[in-house]
Amino acid sequence: MEIDAAVRASSDGRLRTKYDNAVYVVQRAFALYPFEEIAFSFNGGKDSTVLLHLIRAGYYLHKTSCGDEAQINTVQNCPLRTIYFETPCAFPEINSFTYETVSTYGLPLETIRSDFKSGLEGLLKEKSTKAIFIGTRIGDPNAVGQEQFSPSSPGWPPFMRVNPILDWSYRDVWSFLLTCKVKYCSLYDEGYTSIGSIYDTVPNALLSDSSTGNSFRPAYMLSDGRLERAGRAKKTSNNTETNSVASNGMNNAEGEQMIARSASVIVVGDEILFGTVEDKFGAALCKKLHEIGWRVSHVTVVHNEIDSVAEEVKQCKSTDDVVFIFGGLGPLHSDISLAGVAKAFGVRLAPDEEFEEHLSQLIGNSYIGDRNEMALLPEGITELLHHKMLPLPLIKCKNVIILSATNVDELDMEWNCLLDTQESGLLRTKPFVSKHLSTLLPDVKIAPVVAKLCLEFSDVYIGSHRISRTGPLVVSLIGKVKRILELWTPLLIFHPTDNDFSQEGHGRCSSPLRRDLTA
Ligand SMILES: Cc1cc2nc3c(=O)[nH]c(=O)nc-3n(C[C@H](O)[C@H](O)[C@H](O)COP(=O)(O)O)c2cc1C
Ligand SMILES: Nc1ncnc2c1ncn2[C@@H]1O[C@H](COP(=O)(O)OP(=O)(O)OP(=O)(O)O)[C@@H](O)[C@H]1O
Ligand SMILES: [Mg+2]
């Protein structure tokens, strides 16, 4: 059997292990279910092409292990029922590859022309189907919570989803296809790395060949498989992707700038709560976020406990655009932040091969641990943020960014990298304008003036603080409207004779002008 022989002859030990496990799952399925009650869901994509050849190999091994000597020479092909959900939105290359492949390998094809769920309902009504092979892999949006054998979801017709390549990485897929020298859809040689419909799929920009300007390198050259879905971009009606001009005349970048963004900061540290270590990250990050025009809704310090982190993340992730977490990262018993994030999103921690590879390059294989504890990341929701200045990519789970800085200098570096990385979602927005006025007037005199301003300027934050009980009261005006710069005038008008407010400048407060006058 040529697939089995090619993998056995390969020097790639990891591929052999993945292959053995996957083929074992295939053989188990053939042992568990009657052959005619198993189907193979094939769509011409790279994952289902891998699966096709694993099924062929598994079928061969199953037959030969059953001692079916008479059939050994006739089991090069596996006449497994094959289902293809055909839609008019499929790429013609995918369609033709699918039809060509089923014909090459003698697969009996059942084409279904409806959505997955009703198509499967129809299929099961027509023919008893107990199990379906699917090319789902960890990292696919629908893989979360699945095992190699997973019953279909509640509400779906009942069958067993068999996922032999669930734990395969992007790199494993390409090692297999190239090692076995099997044919795959031509789109993968044109820079497509994951293929959906013609309306939502473009070549992966990370494979753009800068020397030629408009061509793309083949899919197997994508170095970080996490980014295989980067080509699943929305095409706009006029086929341009970005920089469209909205109906209000603003371009996207300007429009984005005006949107108010908020963040929250979660610091994980028993030591901070014991008072033995001082938190410097919360304050430093608030300043940085303020500088890019973001509002910080709150900073929390929590214990190194999975539930404490999970509870906080759960709350913040739905109310803020981005949530930052510090601390609790690594292989120690107290390093629970990632488990907390996973719990908040209702997913489990799963080995992440790309991250493992980065770790092994940085610290060597022997330091990672047998169970790859440091490479366990929340399954299906993790993105790695790369930057040439970062020794290790930063971990982002949906809108939660896990920072690995251990001091403020490292935070500066990570922050600059995040600002430089589009995927971080940290868009600079319109900067805040601020004005700080200090006065020695008694609070009772100030209160009505400030209250009146608050009512009048609801889009401006107006607050006050004291540096000492007897010293001046500082009134702060912070907002995104230039009018703030004139806002101190009403205060002066209100007390024309006092002339007792001094202005501390606005924006970055470079040289405060302090003219504290007594009432
Ligand atoms: C054979 C087959 C079985 C599926 N079974 C389920 C299922 O049990 N539960 C479910 O939520 N989705 C099921 N799906 C849908 C997939 O989870 C998922 O929506 C689809 O493969 C994603 O493709 P897309 O990225 O093109 O939307 C099934 C799809 C296929 C092809
Ligand atoms: N239209 C379809 N018809 C039949 N099976 C499908 C269809 N779409 C998805 N599947 C099943 O779901 C699996 C996962 O789909 P997915 O799109 O992630 O992988 P792929 O198409 O094989 O590869 P790629 O990620 O490069 O698009 C497929 O391998 C296949 O088993
Ligand atoms: Mg696909």
Image: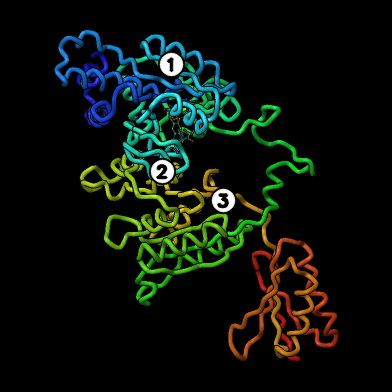
Assign a secondary structure to mark 1.
strand
Q: Nearer the viewer, residue 264 or 183?
A: 183
- Residue drawn 47% across the image and 60% down it: 313
The residue at which mark 3 appears reads as 426
Please state, as top left, top right, bottom left or bottom right, where the C terminus lies in the image. Answer: bottom right
Q: Are the two marked residues, 1 and 2, in contact with CB atoms closer than 8 angstroms?
A: no
Residue type of the residue flagged with mark 2: Val
Q: Nearer the viewer, mark 2 or mark 3?
A: 2
When the figure is inspected, residue 185 is found, relative to residue 152, above or below; the finding is above
Left/right of residue 35 with respect to residue 322 in the rendered view: left
Assign a secondary structure to mark 3.
loop
Residue 182 visible somewhere in the drawing? yes
When the figure is inspected, residue 486 is found, relative to residue 110, above or below; the finding is below
* Label whose residue precedes the other's in the sequence (1 or 2): 1
Q: In 3D space, how far apart are the residues under numbered discs 1 and 2 (Cα atoms)?
A: 29 Å
- Residue drawn 53% across the image and 21% down it: 86
Q: Label 1 neighbourhood size at 10 Å, few (<14), some (14-19), many (20+)? A: many
The residue at which mark 1 appears reads as 109
What is the total number of numbered labels drawn onto the structure image? 3
Give the image quarter of residue 497.
bottom right
Q: In 3D space, how far apart are the residues under numbered discs 2 and 3 (Cα atoms)?
A: 27 Å
Left/right of residue 277 with respect to residue 289 in the rendered view: left
- Where does the image place residue 95, in percent across and percent down from the top left? 51, 16
- Under 8 Å from ligand 1: the CB of mark 2? no
Q: Label 3 neighbourhood size at 10 Å, few (<14), some (14-19), many (20+)? A: some
* Label whose residue precedes the other's in the sequence (2 or 3): 2
Residue type of the residue flagged with mark 1: Leu
Residue type of the residue flagged with mark 3: Leu
- Residue drawn 40% across the image and 26% down it: 47
The residue at which mark 2 appears reads as 144
